Every structure is written in structure tokens, then in C-alpha cells.
Image (tube, rainbow, N blue to C red):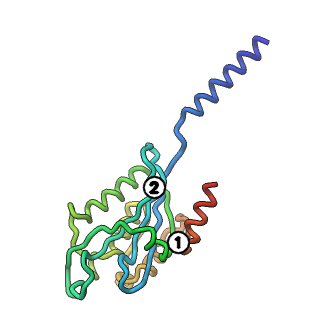
Amino acid sequence: MHLRLRTAFALLLVCVAFAAQPAAAKVRITFWSREEGQMFPHAFFTLDGTPDRGGRPVDISYGFTAKVISPAILFGDVPGKIDITPRSYIMGSFAHFSVWLTDAQYDSVLHLTEEWGEKGDHHYSASKRNCVHFVAEAARRSGLRAVIQPKFVKKPHAFLESVLAMNPQVTRVEANAGTFYGAARASAR
């Protein structure tokens, strides 16, 4: 009887020790495109999950675009801005692929949004510093190979497909937002 009591107590201690451990968590970055004329940005990424180090859950999206959409974007640099892409815009977009980030990669991607935002270099150029360049840098900071060929500078869908081809280790999504978020809800159950 004494041995059973000690064994039960030891088992209880093991269970308490495991219960006290934080749950494993990660932040996922998903790369999106939307190629519909006057709606910007045409390429962006979402972040969702919780950092391994703990903290608040993340569910946000970032893109980069001109502050004012006008013919001026065709003739040179104009002021740019980080765009917090609303869910309604995302719902009309296409998810290409996702990657799970380390905390260091997550921090680096967040730092990118500061570097390209109001406190950093926020100029926009349709051919040299646009939404494709922004997501390419986010992909690199996520540990991916991302090379912008000249033919992809203004073609975010084709560019993101090229990144997918260069990085076979990524999780293919290739779905519209309704399918993507429906699958995420189903896997959370």
C-alpha cells in the first residue's frame, strides 16, 4: 500500500510539472496577393499565433503602398505607408504559402514594418520599392529565398509563386481567404 501511495504521489508530481509548462506556440506568416487594379496593396502578409516566448496572440496583416494612389506613382518616388490590411480586403485575396517563424524571425519581420513605416524610409516607387519588394524582404526575414526578377516587380501573384517554387519547405496554401480561414477554424477544433 505504501509503495502504491508513493507511486501515485510521484505520478501526480509529474502531471503537475507538465501542466505548469507553457503550451508550445508559434507565429505563422502567410503571404497573400490580390491583383485587382485600383485596390492596394497587391501583395501583403498576415501574422497569426503566439510567440514561443509567450505574450499576447497575434492576428494582423501588413502591406506597403503609396499614401495616395494617383498618376504620380507612375513617374517616380512618392510617400508610402504601411497598410494594416483589413479582414474585408483579405477576404478577396489569395493565400499562397505559410511559414512558422522563430521568435527572432518574428521580431525581424515586425522590425521591417517599422523600417518601412513612418519612422523609417517610407518612400514608394512602383518599380523599385513597392509591395512586392516589401513582401520579398519579409520572406527573406522569414528564412526564405526570395529573388525579385524584373518581370515580377509589378506582378505579385507570379512573384509569390516564384518564391514558393524556390522554397519547397514552405506550407503550400494556394487558396482563397474563405478556404484558408475555414481550414484554420476546422484545425483549431
Q: Of label 1 and label 2, which has the lower sequence position?
A: 2
Instruction: In the displayed orientation, state which residue is furthest to the front.
Output: 88
- What amino acid is labelled 1 in the image? Ala
Q: Quadrant of the rendered structure where residue 70 is?
A: bottom left
Q: Residue at x 53, y 71 (%)?
A: 177
The answer for how far apart the CA atoms under marks 1 and 2 are is 21 Å
Residue 150 against residue 28 in the figure, above or below: below
Residue drawn at x 55%, y 69% as measured from the top left: 173
The answer to whether residue 67 is left or right of residue 178 is left
Say which residue label 1 marks: 177
User: What is the three-letter code of the residue carrying label 2?
Assistant: Leu
Task: Point out residue 29 in the picture as x, y percentages from the top left corner.
Answer: 46, 61
Residue on which disc 2 sits? 101
Instruction: Find residue 185 and report its horizontal and vertical position in percent.
Output: 59, 60
Q: Residue at x 20, y 74 (%)?
A: 79
Q: Are marks 1 and 2 in contact (CB under 8 Å)?
A: no
- Residue 2 in percent (x, y) is at 76, 11
Instruction: Where is residue 28? Give x, y as percent.
Output: 48, 58
In this picture, residue 3 sits left or right of residue 116? right
Mark on residue 104?
A: none
Q: Say few, some or many: other residues with alpha carbon within 10 Å of mark 1 (under 14 / 14 to 19 / 20 or more).
A: many
Please tell me which residue lies in front, 60 or 102. Answer: 60
Quadrant holding the N terminus:
top right
Of residues 50 and 156, the one nearer the viewer is 50
Which part of the image, by quadrant, shows the C terminus?
bottom right
Asked which quadrant contains residue 62, the reply is bottom left
For the residue labelled by badge 1, is the local secondary structure a helix, a strand or a loop? helix
Name the residue at 35% across, 84% down: 38
Q: Is residue 37 above or below residue 107?
A: below
Residue found at the very far right of the displayed protein:
1
Kindly give the residue lying farthest to the top in the view shown.
2
